[in-house]
Amino acid sequence: MDPSTIALLLMAVGLVLIVAEVFIPSGGAISVCSAVTILAGVYYAWTAWGSSSPLKLVAYLASLSILIPTGIGTALYMLPHTRVGKAAILSGPTPEETDAFGDLERKHAAFVGQFGVTVTILNPAGTVRIGGERVACQSEGSIIEHGVTVRIVSARYNFVIVRAATGPELAALATGGTPTPSEPILSDPILSPPALETSTLSEGDASAPSAAGNHGSAQKPGEHPADIDFDLS
């Protein structure tokens, strides 16, 4: 067989092997075969055109430099659309999968302000029936018994915070009215803690009562601390 024909055949076989390596995992064996085949084709091309027609040899080498990357790029482009590529390449999450947590958060947020009944004891976590649906909830730290009416005060990510309903709220529910929350509903019990209670003395108080068992007397308004008589006996 003419060396030029062998060179062209080896070039074609080498390109096919390169494309096959992309679709058939072989641990590099097919790549080695393709490299040997292409080098053999270059040798036969040099034998056929090296001295008689150098331009044909240059054209052969230039064709290899163009066809090899083109074949690899085409194979990589087609790979994700083939059965082998779909099995080898993991697909990204679907919109339903990525939005599942958002749906749960929006569902829990819709419970805020509603009332439910505890199905289990909240200690502090448990189950509450809200609108015919069993929802995993937790109290604000206190234990709430089974069968107690509670109000949903916060919904944060994947858990719901509840608080035992007060007397006015229970009375409004019994009459079929719309209960008015007696305490503010927190958007986030962690980021918005309840305000601390403070107390002040009235202007008419002249002195504060002393604690039981405390020796001495309390300081009166206008009295210097040095004038206080302490009983040290």
Image (tube, grey):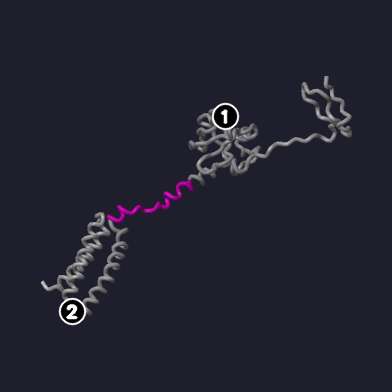
Amino acid beneath label 1: Ile
In x, y percent, where is residue 25?
A: 26, 55
Tell me if residue 87 is in the magenta stretch. yes
Relative to 194, 218 lies left or right: right
Q: Quadrant of residue 64?
A: bottom left
Q: Is residue 205 above or below residue 75?
A: above
Q: Is residue 85 above or below residue 136?
A: below
Q: Is residue 180 visible?
A: no
At x 51% / y 38%, what residue is drawn?
A: 131
Q: Is residue 20 above or below residue 177?
A: below
At x 87% / y 31%, what residue is drawn?
A: 226
In the drawing, what numbered circle is on residue 143?
1
Amino acid beneath label 2: Ser
Precedes in sequence: disc 1 or disc 2? 2
Q: Nearer the viewer, residue 173 or 142?
A: 142
In x, y percent, where is residue 29?
A: 23, 57
Q: Quadrant of the C terminus?
A: top right
